């Protein structure tokens, strides 16, 4: 895993000494490679040391350093682009699977990074940008993308390219305010067009794979029509911060929908939490699924804290089993 904006102290991994590495040299290459890759993925600091063990070990380990990329700042984006351009052609496109871009990275840098790294990404995140968070999405080249997180306080008309939107199973949109072209278009055809008409079919089809959707509590009303448009939607998570004060108001509005897919969840959707979930930590959706399976939903007249009402709430710090499926 690579960070191009900060250094971090990381615990020592099982392969922490030269003697440990020496013992492995008697093992078959296939077993050695599996052990080195597991060690590298569990500990980024160790991975950087392991690439110095031997040339063949570097060949095994170096691709794992590029599986998760987080670029927060403009200067680190420049450094990252220089680094990947020094690699063999196609190296980064073949190895980057998870990519997050921070607010200080420019639009041109983002486009360049996506051009070099997006052929196989399964998860892309844009954090706290001061521009429309969807403007760089046409540069995504992956047909395997499944998860997308967008966070921007810039008033935006969201335009997620159909080739990206139609692949997504998980989508989170935070902050805003925003409008959403494809959702508005689908609702128009849902109300005014025959269901056998090509325009209706094409407008609704782009949402066919979406099963998990998350939106912040202040702007969820602009996305509620997704409950009608996304036919395979399982969870519609309304995300509140730990400091949120208007819980009762949102809870009442959710109750009026009487839809079991709608869940009110407390969660701080930071880059750190995004990365932790990729590396096997607890995930927002694990908690939402646990909440619903436990019987807490918007159609029931109870809350987790025991107060009379019609909403469901779970604290994102509550330990729950991790059930996240592996990336495709």
Image (cartoon, rainbow, N blue to C red):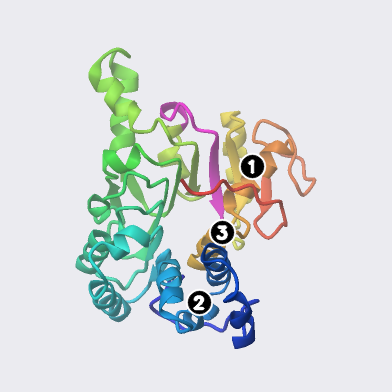
Which is more N-terminal, label 3 or label 2?
2
Query: What residue lies at 27% left-to-right and 60% top-to-bottom?
Result: 114
Report the side of 188 relative to 208 (left or right): left
Q: Disc 3 versus disc 1: distance between alpha carbons?
A: 15 Å
Report the number of discs.
3
Q: Marks 2 and 3, Cα distance to the nearest angstrom?
A: 20 Å
Element class at badge 1: helix
Instruction: Identify the disc placed on residue 47.
Output: 2
Circles 2, 1 touching at the beta carbon (< 8 Å): no
Residue name at image x 31 percent, y 49 percent: 142
Depth check, mark 2 against mark 3: the one in front is 2
Q: Quick check: 149 left or right of 86?
A: right
Q: Residue furthest left?
A: 108
User: Who is closer to the viewer here, 134 or 313?
Assistant: 134
Q: Which residues are magenta?
A: 227-240
Left or right relative to 238: residue 130: left
Q: Is residue 194 above or below residue 137?
A: above
Task: Using the image as rendered, state which of residue 247 and residue 30 is in the foreground.
Answer: 30
Crowding at dot 3, Cα within 10 Å, few <14 / some 14-19 / many 20+, comes out as some
Please say whether residue 280 is one of the residues in the magenta stretch: no
Binning the other alpha carbons within 10 Å of mark 1 as few (below 14), some (14 to 19) or many (20 upward) gives many
Rendered view: 256 above or below 38: above
The residue at which mark 1 appears reads as 289
Q: Which mark is residue 277?
A: 3
SS at circle 3:
helix
Question: Do labels 3 and 1 touch, CB within 8 Å?
Answer: no
Residue 43: which quarter of the image?
A: bottom right
Whether residue 176 is visible: yes
Q: Position of residue 24 (x, y in %)?
A: 60, 75
Which is more toward the observer, 301 or 15?
15
Residue 312 seen in render: no
Residue at (59% x, 54% y) in the render: 283
């Amino acid at each position: 895993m690579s960070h191009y904006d900060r250094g971090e102290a990381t615990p020592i991994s099982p392969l922490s000494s030269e003697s440990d590495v020496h013992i492995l040299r008697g093992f078959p290459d296939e077993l050695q490679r599996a052990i080195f890759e597991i060690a590298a993925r569990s500990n980024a600091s160790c991975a950087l040391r392991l690439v110095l063990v031997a040339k063949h070990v570097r060949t095994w380990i170096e691709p794992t350093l590029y599986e998760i990329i987080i670029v927060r700042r403009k200067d680190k984006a420049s450094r990252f682009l220089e680094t990947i351009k020094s690699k063999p052609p196609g190296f980064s496109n073949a190895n980057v699977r998870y990519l997050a871009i921070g607010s200080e990275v420019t639009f041109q840098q983002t486009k360049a990074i996506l051009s070099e790294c997006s052929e196989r990404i399964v998860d892309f995140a844009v954090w706290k940008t001061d521009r429309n968070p969807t403007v760089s999405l046409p540069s995504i080249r992956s047909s395997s993308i499944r998860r997308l997180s967008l966070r921007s306080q810039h008033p935006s008309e969201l335009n997620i390219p159909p080739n990206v939107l139609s692949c997504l199973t998980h989508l989170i949109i935070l902050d805003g305010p925003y409008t959403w072209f494809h959702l508005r278009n689908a609702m128009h055809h849902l109300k005014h067009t025959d269901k056998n008409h090509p325009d209706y079919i094409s407008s609704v089809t782009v949402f066919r794979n979406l099963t998990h959707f998350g939106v912040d509590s202040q702007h969820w009303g602009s996305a509620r029509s997704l409950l009608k448009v996304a036919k395979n939607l399982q969870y519609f998570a309304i995300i509140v911060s730990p400091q949120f004060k208007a819980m009762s108001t949102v809870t009442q509005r959710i109750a009026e929908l009487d839809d079991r897919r709608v869940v009110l969840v407390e969660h701080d959707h930071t880059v750190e939490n995004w990365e932790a979930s990729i590396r096997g930590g607890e995930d927002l959706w694990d908690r939402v699924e646990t909440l619903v399976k436990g019987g807490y939903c918007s159609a029931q007249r109870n809350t987790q804290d025991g107060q009379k009402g019609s909403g469901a709430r779970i604290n994102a710090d509550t330990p729950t089993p991790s059930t996240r499926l592996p990336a495709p």
